[in-house]
Image (cartoon, rainbow, N blue to C red):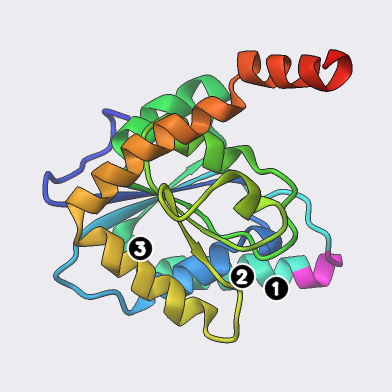
Amino acid sequence: VKKYDLNDDELIFLFVGRIVPEKGIKHLLEALLDFPKNVKYKLFIVGSFGSSFGKKETYDKFRKEIFNLIEKIKDNIVFTGFISNKELPSYHALSDIVFMPSIYSEPAGMVAIEALASGRPVITTDAGGIPEYVNNNCAIIVPRSENFVINLKNEILSLSVDKLRRNQMGLIGIETAKQYSPQTYYNNFYKVLYG
């Protein structure tokens, strides 16, 4: 990540995932469109366009919409494309806030758990199983309502200007992520099988 020309006064936002409608990237970009100019940031979009649940023409339209949104705030966007899993920790270490704005029933996205384990606060949604493994102490869970984009923007802004809260959420996130370590998973699985 040393290759990126970043300023010390810029917040680093991170989105990791396939660039598909159900992951909520369009809503995230819309939320950042009229972000206050005094809050300087770079949004790292780590991932590539992948297969989607929709039809090809719907997906082609989505790609066009994404590129149009990126063009409007291009000075704030770093589009990395696919990054291998072994490189992801350096992007987490660089970030201030990690986004997982899923709008479909996400079963158990690893993005949030990886962010928590890295000590980073997460802004996510109430989609699927997400609220089962993050909580309001380490993440901001935005309901997917008709005001979703506005509420998402407000939560991003609120957390952006509160470094102390980000740090506190990060510390709680590290403890929360320990529940999902391989050893803890094994121990819990063993208890289910053998009491």
Q: Is residue 18 visible?
A: no
Determine the CA span between mark 2 and mark 1.
5 Å
Cα–Cα gap, marks 2 and 3:
15 Å
Residue 180 in picture, x, y percent from top left: 60, 28
* Quadrant in the rendering for residue 179: top right
Whether residue 56 is in magenta: the answer is yes
Is residue 47 placed above or below 58 in the rendered structure?
Answer: above
Residue 61's disc is: 1
Front residue of this view, candidates 5 and 193? 193
Say whether disc 2 or disc 3 marks the residue closer to the N-terminus: 2
Relative to 24, is 7 above or below?
A: above
Residue corresponding to mark 3? 74
Sequence-wise, which precedes: disc 1 or disc 3? 1
**Callout 2, which amino acid?**
Lys
Quarter of image, res 140: bottom left
Residue 169 place in picture, x, y as percent: 34, 45
x, y percentage for residue 165?
Answer: 25, 52
**Residues in magenta?**
54-58
Q: Secondary structure at mark 2?
A: helix
Residue 87 appears left or right of 41? right
Q: State the SS at label 1.
A: helix
Residue ID at (51%, 31%): 177
Q: Where is 150 relative to 66, above or below? A: below
Could you tell me which residue is drawn at 83 percent across and 22 percent down? 192
Question: At x 12% / y 44%, what residue is drawn?
Answer: 8
> In this rendering, would 38 be left or right of 126?
left
Q: Are marks 2 and 1 in contact (CB under 8 Å)?
A: yes
Helix, strand or loop at label 3? It is helix
Q: Amino acid at mark 1?
A: Lys
Residue with the mark numbered 2 = 64
Residue sitting at the far bottom = 146
